Image (cartoon, rainbow, N blue to C red):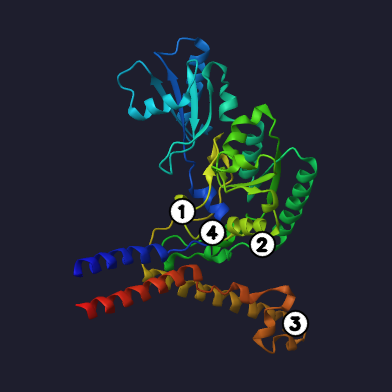
Amino acid sequence: MEIKFKVYIFFLIIFLNWCSFACEVPVFKYAMEFWSSDKYDIYIFNSGELKNQKDKNTFNIINEASLADYKSSQANVNLHFVDLTSNKVTAQERKLWEEQKADKQPWIAVYYPFVHGKERKVWAGYFGDVNPNFLLTSPKRQEIVKLLLEGESAVWVFLESGNKNADSRALRLLNRELMRLERTLKLPIPETWGWAGSAESIDINIGTEAAADTEISFSVLTLSRDDPAEEILLNTLLKSEKDLHKYTGQPMVFPIYGRGLILYALIGNGINEWTLNKAGEFLTGPCSCEVKAGNPGIDMLLRVNWDSRKTFAIPQEAPPLTGVSEFFSRVEKEKEIAEQLEEQEVLTIEETAEKNNDLTTITNLDTIQTINGNNVASTKTPINLKIVLPIALVLVLAITTFFITKNKS
């Protein structure tokens, strides 16, 4: 019992350290700055080496794109050549080849990033018919990349169903709601964006400078199911969730953010005010989990140089996980910053009122927050309930377990 209890406390401490960290940078911004794209696996199957010069050229182009450095456009792919006559073929590669049921060689198969413990095929075909540009990029994918690099919070890909009436209704609703969300959604408090490791390192200027260059902006991109140039993109979207093939007769919306992350699919009647609002809130809200795998989304297959974008003055390194004491230190520091900002606002309003000989505007602090349309109260930083509640719950469980163990012993 004593050993079990010590193990429990050990995991409790780890959990508290995990819960104690919060990041106020918006999700879409944090994803662009810190989350590198997961890599697709591309397998080329052939009995022996490639002999056709065109096939060799195609292979070399894909291979060079996968190895490109930060100065040029890089494709998020790992390229594997499998010589089926070799005794070095692994059991996994042999299994993948048998699943192809291909009637000709060389054969190419593209798989989603191996991040969930299972190979999932996106597309496959005869390698001799493959154009590298068809595989690595396309007009719609280039447009998505361009918009994200220009600073769009998200690009909402509207996949047409083919039913004109259904598509028209859904697209009108999507455009209307996104315009509303651009006006109503609020970014996290800019003054806390500059936190980079400890409570003492909060820098108001870093946060406000980053926020000054950041605004909530959404774009809509329509995609036809019958566009042959977008076959890879279409497959990537429709196979990103295992059951989407059941809804081919309905319009779909895929929010894409960060470095080409597909958030999830909204389908048919699921494209509504509530679901769009929730997706928008997640994308523009504080990044509560900095580990990419802990957030929804799957990467698109792209060839792009993400380092060519405009950089922002936010922390250059992801803040480390810290303990409970550091969390409360940070909260106190944020409160101190908020109080300083409020004092500055009050002094400004007092000076303005004195100049206008209208001291009635500052008779009590409750009215200050609404003067000139400024919401001073919003600069106060409350304790993040998403963090405090899990900590409190685990502490209660720990104390309860302790007394139960003590009574049994």
Q: Disc 3, disc 4: CB below 8 Å?
A: no
Q: How far separated are the C-alphas under marks 1 and 2?
A: 23 Å
Q: Which quarter of the rendered picture does the C terminus lie within? A: bottom left
Residue labelled with disc 3: 355
Amino acid at dot 1 = Gly
Give the label on residue 294, or none: 1
| In the image: residue 338, left or right of residue 316 | right
Q: Disc 1, disc 4: CB below 8 Å?
A: no
Report the front residue among 123 and 259.
123
Callout 1 secondary element: helix
Question: Can you say whether 119 is above or below 52 in the image?
Answer: below
Amino acid at dot 3 = Lys
Amino acid at dot 4 = Val
Callout 3 secondary element: helix
Residue displayed at 57% across by 52% down: 28
Counting from the top left corner in percent of width and height, residue 93 is at 38, 27
Callout 4 secondary element: loop
Residue labelled with disc 4: 25
Counting from the top left corner in percent of width and height, residue 393 is at 41, 73
> In terms of sequence position, does the residue under pointer 1 or pointer 2 come before the other?
2
Residue displayed at 49% across by 27% down: 109
1 or 3: mark nearer the eye: 1
> In terms of sequence position, does the residue under pointer 3 or pointer 2 come before the other?
2
> Is residue 152 at all visible to an observer of this figure?
no
Q: Disc 2, disc 4: CB below 8 Å?
A: no
Q: How far separated are the C-alphas under marks 1 and 3?
A: 53 Å
Q: Disc 1, disc 3: CB below 8 Å?
A: no
Report the front residue among 250 and 187.
250
Residue labelled with disc 2: 185
